[in-house]
Image (spheres, coloured by chain):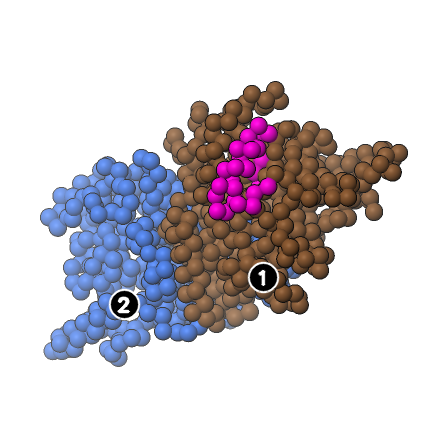
Chain colours: A blue, B brown
């Protein structure tokens, strides 16, 4: 049960800290060391063919990105592998990001592929600390796709763009033969302007930081699963798809004046090794890192932060907000809500001294009413996410293996 | 034969000017008027389902763009429907564009979906007058796609990016089930910086301007058709896929000092109604409009220019460079090379006084050795493209109906 080599996922990677097991510290240390060793290995894609797991957002996706895409395209702007790239244009900093959407079904309670595609890119721009401004829209349509459905999708995109205050300024349409797509795929890329002197990064977390989620998790993923009708579960759930730029603004505004660098363990406020032109006033403030928890859920985001920052992230299971409908569906499906996608929830890592300010700012916004402090950043064990369970145990929350929820975005 | 109502395409829209027919001017006028009326009608998508023609780049694509996408997303930056949007960021102008690539087969003589996706977006940025800088890459992979093929595609993208001097800075990967894609689709979006005081637009052509193509046309499209192996034709052809930023730079440099505004019919040099923040030094110079002739070929580009500028474009059939292999294949396929895609050819509309300078600049660049002056811009009939054939006749070259060459990019 504690053998996690190679295949750690879901609840497999369990390391119990029960008092009864306190006599076996070396076993636990061995496990941690083996995980650490496995992670430091150069990423490889062992499979000869693409599998659904390569699209899960989990381990296989990470290997694909590192071994194929990063290997081929390597440059300092791509290397941080954040949700968007930060570009210096003159004295301005821009964020630039892209996502393709292949969600099935195209229409689901609370949204559709259209608003998902707009909100997703708006959110990726927002968590870079930028004000989302301009979007592109690329459509791949399957021959035979109903034109009325396309009208619904574009109307939904237009509404979402208006709500987020962005404009769709350029686009493209391709058509493929029947059976060569699944109705409609949408790609959006986006450009945002970084107007604040912030530098947000998954590598920015420090011991003592607080970990916050902006509301109940897993609603989007479970809604999609139920919308497929493959399960005989009735739950009154809708996708949480929403544009997070307003919420992010509220958070960054509130935390702008928190003296984050007073901490004795603070790193240099300005990262002079930044791969882009950081204007002189850009600094790491009280907000270290923001992410929207999509594919792979909150667990994946926390792993990326732990890994990139070389810190431990310790979360309290009981503190994580999960609606009963989501919890029930997850239990029936045998999946952990921590791995289920949200499309309108923020994970924020903030200086410990700013935790209350951040929580209050999030809760003061309609999209952050259910915000909760779910954990803290610690020194040890670096690179790992630990979950303190309701029963007093601790288990490792590793990256996802396989893809139990394909095509949710 | 001269009845072109509704369905004008290929060679159907023929209006002969033979001396023998000179006694029927009213017939010709009627035809022109009916075409004009049809074009001014509000675009509608009559079909209930998407057809391959909606992806052709021709009439159906145009209707789809105007009736669905422009209708839903309408804003001043999208409205020009150029190859990219021009954005004002501070005192800088940026170009932003996107294209999805669904070419079949993925690998073909002279290139593959990877370099096509990089070059295509580099070219769209270039013809906006910008220096291409940053690209995003979004992959939609079909379950079962060979990982080695993905490696080939990404290696090809990396080489193309290096050649064009751009960096792939952000990306995304989605995987869909077997039978829900065709191996691999790639979306690239791009950001470029407009460093020159130019304002290029399909609406910028004026009577007296010269129309130039940068080399032999139709090679990409015919190569793809032959690579599918559906035809028993052997021709030693390779795709013309290439990054055009260097060629565009050479052209703009050479024409920068041509006094274009001395023409009596010159419009205002600075378009004060421009939908973006045009810095005060931006002006329409001797180069009016640049386009890369992809889907729909040179004929489609010229129609867009004629329509947007309210001018006639008159081209000489014998002046259009077409390699014998392309001409032969087109004859067997029953298609006109004017409608066949290039992926490394420029269509340039320049002030008549700059024609020689422009031709010399293009011919001095390895990618423009075969540049040719193919026609001129006239007042009348506005909105139409006329082809003077080798036999002394004239025919209307209309937008494409249907899609004789699906999925060539």
Q: Which residues are magenta?
A: B347-372
Residue B32 vertical position relative to residue A153 in the rendered view, above or below: above
Give the residue drawn at x 18%, y 44%: A269
Going by the image, does B71 lie left or right of B31?
left
Q: Residue at x 32, y 53 (%)?
A: A75
Q: Where is residue A85 drawn, in percent x and y?
A: 35, 49
Question: Is residue B316 visible from the viewing direction of this image?
Answer: yes
Q: Is residue A220 left or right of residue B67?
A: left
Tell me which corner region of the image, top left, top right, bottom left or bottom right, holds residue B299. top right
Label 2 CA crowd tier, 10 Å (few <14, some 14–19, many 20+): few
Left or right: A28 in relation to B34: left
Q: Chain of mark 2?
A: A
Which mark is drawn over residue A42? 2
Q: Secondary structure at mark 2?
A: loop
Residue marked by disc 1: B236
Q: Chain of mark 1?
A: B
The answer to whether residue A390 is seen in the rendering is: no
Decide: few, some or many residues near mark 1? Use Cα within 10 Å; few <14, some 14-19, many ≥20.
Answer: few
- Rounded to the nearest whole Å, what is the CA distance between mark 2 and mark 1? 43 Å
State the mark number for residue A214. none
Foreground disc of the pair 2, 1: 1
Taking the image as shown, residue B33 lies to the left or right of residue A397, namely: right
* Residue A301, x across and y down, in percent: 32, 58
B267 to B1, vertically: above or below? above
The spot of residue A391 in percent (x, y) is 24, 70
Residue projecting furthest to the right: B23
């Amino acid at each position: 049960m504690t053998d996690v080599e190679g295949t750690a996922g879901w609840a497999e990677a369990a390391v119990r800290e029960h008092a009864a097991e306190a006599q076996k510290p070396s076993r636990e240390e061995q496990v941690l060391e083996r995980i650490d060793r496995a992670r430091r290995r150069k990423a490889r894609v062992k499979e000869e063919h693409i599998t659904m797991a390569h699209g899960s957002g989990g381990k296989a996706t990470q290997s694909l990105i590192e071994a194929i895409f990063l290997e081929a395209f390597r440059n300092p702007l791509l290397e941080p592998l954040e949700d968007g790239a930060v570009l210096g244009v003159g004295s301005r900093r821009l964020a630039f990001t892209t996502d393709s959407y292949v969600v099935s079904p195209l229409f689901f309670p609370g949204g559709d592929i259209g608003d998902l595609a707009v909100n997703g890119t708006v959110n990726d721009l927002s968590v870079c600390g930028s004000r989302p401004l301009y979007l592109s829209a690329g459509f791949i349509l399957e021959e035979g796709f109903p034109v009325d459905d396309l009208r619904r999708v574009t109307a939904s995109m237009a509404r979402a763009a208006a709500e987020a205050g962005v404009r769709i300024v350029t686009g493209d349409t391709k058509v493929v033969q029947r059976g060569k797509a699944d109705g409609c795929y949408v790609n959006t890329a986006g450009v945002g302007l970084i107007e604040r002197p912030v530098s947000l990064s998954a590598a920015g977390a420090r011991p003592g930081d607080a970990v916050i989620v902006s509301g109940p998790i897993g609603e989007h993923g479970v809604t999609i699963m139920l919308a497929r009708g493959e399960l005989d579960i009735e739950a009154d759930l809708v996708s949480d798809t929403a544009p997070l730029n307003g919420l992010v603004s509220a958070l960054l505004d509130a935390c702008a004046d928190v003296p984050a660098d007073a901490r004795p363990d603070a790193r240099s406020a300005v990262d002079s090794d930044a791969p882009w032109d950081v204007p002189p006033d850009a600094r790491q403030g009280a907000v270290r890192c923001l992410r929207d928890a999509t594919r792979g859920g909150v667990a994946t985001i926390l792993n990326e932060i732990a890994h990139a920052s070389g810190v431990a992230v310790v979360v309290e299971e009981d503190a994580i907000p999960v609606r009963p409908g989501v919890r029930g569906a997850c239990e029936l499906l045998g999946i952990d809500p921590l791995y289920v996608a949200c499309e309108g929830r923020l994970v924020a890592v903030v200086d410990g001294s700013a935790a209350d300010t951040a929580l209050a700012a999030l809760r003061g916004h309609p999209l952050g009413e259910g915000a909760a402090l779910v954990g803290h950043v610690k020194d040890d064990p670096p690179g790992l996410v630990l979950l303190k369970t309701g029963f007093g145990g601790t288990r490792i929350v590793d990256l996802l293996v396989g893809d139990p929820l394909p095509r949710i975005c």
